[in-house]
Amino acid sequence: MMYSSKKDYDRAEEYILEALKLHQEMEFNAEISRDLLGLGVVYKEKKLLDGAGENIREALEIALETGDYWAIATCYENLSEINVLKGNLNKALEEFKLFKTYNDSIITEENREKIAELEVKYQTEKKEKENLVLQQEVEISGMTIRQKNTQISIFIVVIIVVLALLIVIFVLFRQKSRSYAALVRQNLKSLEIEKKLEESIVQNRDETSPELSVQDQRLKDLSIRLKKFIVEEKPYLWAEVNMEEFCLKLDTNRTYLSKVINDQFNQSFQELLCEYRVRAARDLLADPSNNLLSVEGIGEMAGFNNNATFHRKFKGLVSLTPKQFRDKALASVPSFGTKRFLS
């Protein structure tokens, strides 16, 4: 914030990226959203409008999940300004209306919080007066010794409760650690199965089925060629790959390719790329020979060009962060002898 106010946006960007990295490691979604928002604002000031819009939209997506009204309102406000700069005035007006809606909600919530604070203050003062009267009555009636005994009892109970909580926390931690290890073992086993499936796909021959119509046979052939293309050439590792490149490689069009992906994989094109990239990252993280590579570097090797997206998509599919998966996998790999996904 200080460097932004000084218009030193390069330094501001540097510190925001550091904060984003730390918050991703700690899985603080609200802070991640605000970091991405701040990064988008910096890019907006630097006139990097596409990068600004991408970061702010990702911040908006997380803010909507966490219910952070301030971040949501600020995201819509900045997206509106970006669209004004781009000349998209209708889109800018639509986003400005959303900004006003969420901003009004924040003001209403703030009033509600002030009323609640006053109520708490009133109840606290009332309680303090009652306690003062009670204490005076105890002193007058000679209850000092009894009061001390009560305090000692409370202290003992607090100690017991704290110890019980520590034990519960320890047990939960052990259970969580074991569940993480089980998830990793399951993923490592699935790597072997995926490798065998891919080998069978590569060895599968294209055959014509007389009972199929020309259209269905064409879709079946395209499905087989798509699977072989993914397995043999691994286009998901290309950071900037798009559907047009797939169509060119497979000698088809977007309509046929989209239908095959939807029917065979039950996914969109981007979801398909993401799943294979996570598989590749999972394999790289489980390989001890890659131990010196950073998690971010492995994300780039797997085809992700955005570190925040890599962490979010990986955890969504594997239920662990990349770092958690690597820590558990490196101890589990020798017992499974996993064949490398990228070999």
Image: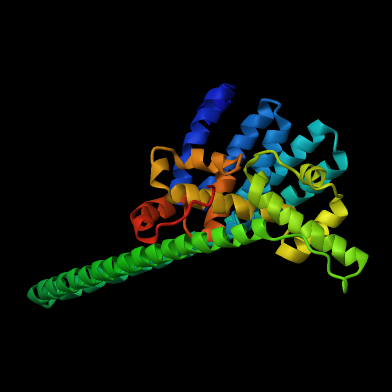
Front-most of residues 113 and 326:
326
**Side of 288 relative to 343 (left or right):** left
**Side of 168 relative to 307 (left or right):** left
Q: Residue furthest right?
A: 214
Q: Position of residue 293 (x, y in %)?
A: 43, 38
Q: Position of residue 215 (x, y in %)?
A: 91, 64
Q: Position of residue 334 (x, y in %)?
A: 35, 56
* Residue depicted at 16% across the width and 69% down the height: 155
* Residue depicted at 70% across the width and 56% down the height: 227
**Residue 75 found in image quarter:** top right
Q: How is the image coloured?
A: rainbow
Residue 248 visible in the snapshot: yes
Total count of labels: 0
* Residue depicted at 65% across the width and 40% down the height: 238
Q: Position of residue 37 (x, y in %)?
A: 61, 41
Front-most of residues 148 and 36:
36
Query: Is 249 rendered above or below residue 255?
Result: above
Residue 113 visible in the snapshot: no
